[in-house]
Image (cartoon, rainbow, N blue to C red):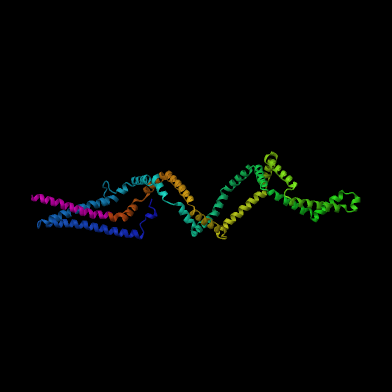
Amino acid sequence: MTLPATFIIDSPGDAIRAAELRRVKLLATSVLAATFATFLAARALLPLHPAFGFIAAFAEAATIGGLADWYAVVALFKRPLGLPIPHTAIIQSNQHRIADKLGEFIEKHFLEAAPVEAKLRQIDFGAFIADWLRDKKRSEDLARFALRLLPEAVAATETSGLMTFVSRRITAQLMAIDLAPLAAGTLRAFVKEGRHSGLLDDILRAVHQTMTQAETMAMIREKIRAELPTLLKLYRADKFLVNKIVASATAFFEEVRNDPAHPFRGEFDRMVLSFVDRLGTDPSYAERIQGLKRDLLARPEVAGLARHIWENTRSFFERSASGETQVLEQYLVRMFVKAGEALAGDAELRTEINQGLVAVLRTVIAEQKSGVSTFISDQVKSWDMGQLISLIEINIGRDLQYIRFNGSLIGGLAGLALYTLEYLLRLL
């Protein structure tokens, strides 16, 4: 398996570092060759003057030090000269062990509960969310993103059977509601607030308007005329009686409407309260209401209405997602911006958000840290080590090459010191 694309050496920076590495390698090799040549020359000139002995000692030790450090640097990444020497190509030979130890190290030292929580508490998630939402451009992007997801979410809802499940659950919940006590409580509050008095006035006004209509008066007159003796019909007593009935009813209605303490209002109050009490306690009323509810929910018009509402809602979402209408997008943008402004001004809420997110993330990290360790280990094991080593060499190889310079210098100085000590001991 090859390395991820991010490990491929093709960036301008990598090219520059690779060229610098080649330059430093050539320089280090040149120094090694120069010290070896100096050693040979000094050994050849040693009979001419004792000073060449010091030069030869320095050059010899510098050559040995340079070779030793060259071997150490090369052995870290590959086999020197391609020879199967033990304990060389250290990184490649220990790929799996390095992978396991890297994952274990990260799990123990980076994902421990205490440092993770301390780091999370340094982050003001609430302020970040508030600032993000208050930015109108970001809120617009978020609104458009949400709208783009809506059609897919609607389609998934329809094809997954979720709509059927939700519809059944809603119907079941509606059927489980006992409407009788609920209606009784609502009516009792209605009466307690005195709103039934206005209802009575509206009823009286509607009855009065109905009675004074020509069609209604004609119908009443026909009923009365059918019951009157023939003699009274000749004197048109039916018209007189209708007018008297309408006039009396009008006077009564006006009297009740204008007198808040009218006895009829008291009777109406007692009648309403009696109905409310029976509605809340009488099983027959409860059964009637339940039957009415069942009949209502079973009617095809209700299902058709629900489908019509859903179709309109889906069409509105689709038009909003396509940009045909901006109503929903503008509403979402305003909602997000206002939410950000409200969050920015509510320090207590931001604190609660921070605490909540810290608790959630801490738990998630604690539960998944072993998985993270395994993931890192598996990824490192799957890498192409040849490419990885090339990447490491390009990034730190230049500094490693300076070890060769240091080896030559330190080795040379050590050899010079030993030769000087030997020379002084020979003079004694």
Q: Is residue 24 magenta?
A: no
- Magenta run includes residue 413: yes
Above/below status of 251 relative to 178: below
Q: Is residue 78 visible?
A: no
Q: Is residue 226 left or right of residue 106?
A: right
Seen in the picture, residue 308 relative to 270 is either above or below; the reply is below
Residue found at the very far right of the displayed protein: 231
How many numbered discs?
A: 0
From the top left corner, tell me how far across and down residue 365 is, in percent. 42, 46
Q: Nearer the viewer, residue 369 or 208?
A: 208
Q: Is residue 164 left or right of residue 277?
A: left
Magenta segment, prevailing SS (helix, strand or loop): helix
Residue lying at 81% horizontally and 51% vertically, measured from the top left = 248
| Along the viewing direction, whichever of 188 and 298 lies nearer the viewer | 188
- Residue 107 location (% of width, % of height): 38, 45
Tell me residue 262's x, y (percent): 74, 48
Q: Tell me which residue sits at (72%, 43%) in the image.
A: 270
Residue 159, percent across and down? 57, 49
Q: Which residues are magenta?
A: 400-428
**Res 36 visible:** yes
Quarter of the figure with residue 317: bottom right
Relative to 373, 166 lies left or right:
right
